[in-house]
Amino acid sequence: MKVTETELSGVLILEPRVFEDKRGFFMETFHKEKYEKAGITVEFVQDNFSFSQKNTLRGLHYQHPHGQAKLVHVVQGAVFDVAVDIRLGSPTFGKWTGAELSAANRRQLFIPPGFAHGFVVLSDTASFVYKCSDFYFPDCEAGIIFSDPQLAIRWPGGNFLLSPKDQQYPVLQHISPGDLPRFPG
């Protein structure tokens, strides 16, 4: 497995080994020991699947408390996936990183707890699968508006399809410090 560190400490791009022949391909999407060697030591407790149309933008989501690490990948289509460091006291607080994930490139993105997460669908449709290190707690659900000018995320595309909830999230600077995770360092 190829592991690429991003500019945000702990956020990793993973490229699992793929065995391909005329019948198709096989790959491990998770192997506890191999992922631990890559530095991913969280225990995943929930798997999620979403299907979305082109230009659907989901995010930027996080939970606090009950932060979730996520291991995400696309099984059909393509997305631009984003992680934003929202850990108070972090040297990269308010910075983001993004990667194209697709069924064709078979990449995964690992996002540690303390980061907001979102993606936009680049293909006609996309099937998106992700593991979470904590359960979903509706009372802990929170988010940041995708268009926060201080974050200045360069989302590809336009005419985004957003849920009513995602349209009403605040900018990061308007979130109370008590509602954000803290950097452990």
Image (tube, helix red, strand yellow):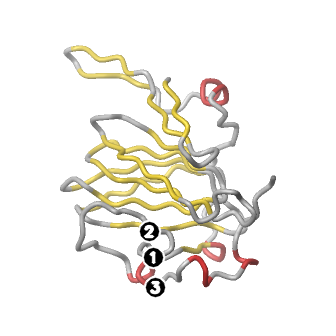
Whole-percent x, y for residue 57 in the image: 35, 67
Q: CA distance from mark 3 to mark 2?
A: 17 Å
Q: Is residue 160 left or right of residue 68?
A: left
The numbered disc on residue 149 is: 1
Residue for badge 3: 168
**Residue at position x 25%, y 22% in the image:** 24
Of callouts 1 and 3, which one flags the residue occurring earlier in the amino acid sequence?
1
Q: Is residue 142 above or below residue 33?
A: below
Viewer-nearest of discs 3 and 2: 2
Whole-percent x, y for residue 61 in the image: 52, 67
Residue for badge 2: 152
What's under tag 3, amino acid-wise? Answer: Gln
Q: Secondary structure at mark 2?
A: loop
**Residue at position x 41%, y 82% in the image:** 167
**Residue at position x 68%, y 69% in the image:** 64
**Residue at position x 56%, y 60% in the image:** 95
What's under tag 2, amino acid-wise? Answer: Ala
Of callouts 3 and 2, which one flags the residue occurring earlier in the amino acid sequence?
2
Q: Is residue 146 left or right of residue 70?
A: left
**Tag 1–tag 3 contact (CB < 8 Å):** no
**Tag 3–tag 2 contact (CB < 8 Å):** no
- Disc 1 residue crowd, few under 14, some 14–19, many 20+, Cα 10 Å: few
Viewer-nearest of discs 1 and 3: 1
Whole-percent x, y for residue 141 in the image: 60, 73
The residue lying furthest to the top in this view is 21
Q: Is residue 104 left or right of residue 28?
A: left
